[in-house]
Amino acid sequence: MKIKWFKKFANSPLGEKIIGNVAYFYLKFVGLTTRWQSVTGVKETYETLEKYGSMIVIGWHGRTLLMPYFWNKTSNLNALVSPHRDGRIIVHILRKFGIGNIDGSTDRNSKEAAMELMRNLQQGNSIAIIPDGPRGPSMKLTMSPLFYAQKSGKPILGITYSTEGAKIVLKSWDNMLVPLPFHRGMYAITEPIFIPPEATAGELEQYRQKIETTLNELTWKLDKAMGLPYVAPGKEAKKSRYKKSD
């Protein structure tokens, strides 16, 4: 009975807002109490943003919780978020960090979301995409960010982090890393990668593999430094709960 009541509450607009706010304050608390041993690429990222006006931010689904922590809110950043219950909670968290949202995913509202993402880039807004979400395989890059980069001329930057003592949910499809307060941490952003407008399908695949490998190796490097176990990329996507809208 209590479980049914909580599910009903969590599915309500009020419940989503409360859960989102609690999650935000927890993550903010974790970020503030983490002894950041190394923060790499943040300053350079804002220099890139100033030079090119907007950018395409990516990161793995299992490392999303503290991804927004160092966002300085000086320009517009809108993240692609699935319009299901979990996604609506994420929207509340993002807004607290000063990040907007675009509804959609590969499962739902995909065409409309694609057009909105491109419009944002054309209007000088940065976009954030989780390229192994919402179903995986985890730590496997889709072509989506490369297409936006190729058409817009904007750079792709990958974000990852690791914290000492974090809990890795190995039973989840994305091996979600849940950071805990009062530990050491490392945060890193890759160098910007540009996709030539004339790149062929074969060249796009080479860029895709390069970006995926770079982000994975950086994640493993941080995990090793923080004493966390190796997390292997996923092999299969989890089944979708929705029929594709297209």
Image: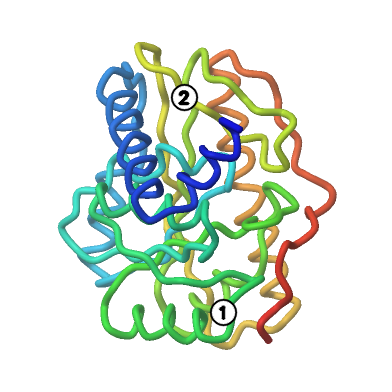
Tell me whether circle 1 and circle 2 mark residues in contact (CB < 8 Å). Answer: no
Instruction: Please state which of the two labelled residues, at mark 1 or mark 2, is closer to the viewer.
Output: 1
What amino acid is found at the position of numbered circle 1 in the picture? Asn
Q: Nearer the viewer, residue 200 or 219?
A: 219
Q: Is residue 92 left or right of residue 145?
A: left
Report which quarter residue 144 is drawn in.
bottom right
In the rendering, at what x and y percent does residue 49 appear? 26, 63
Q: Is residue 89 left or right of residue 228?
A: left
What amino acid is found at the position of numbered circle 2 in the picture? Pro
Q: Which mark is residue 179?
A: 2
Tag 2 secondary structure? loop
Instruction: Give the total of numbered labels.
Output: 2
Question: Can you identify the residue that label 1 sits on?
Answer: 109
Task: Write the residue at 47% across / 22% down.
Answer: 163
Question: How would you rate the neighbour count of disc 2 (Cα within 10 Å): few for under 14, some for 14-19, many for 20 or more?
Answer: many
Is 144 located above or below residue 2 in the figure?
below
Tag 1 secondary structure? loop
Is 46 located above or below residue 181 in the figure?
below
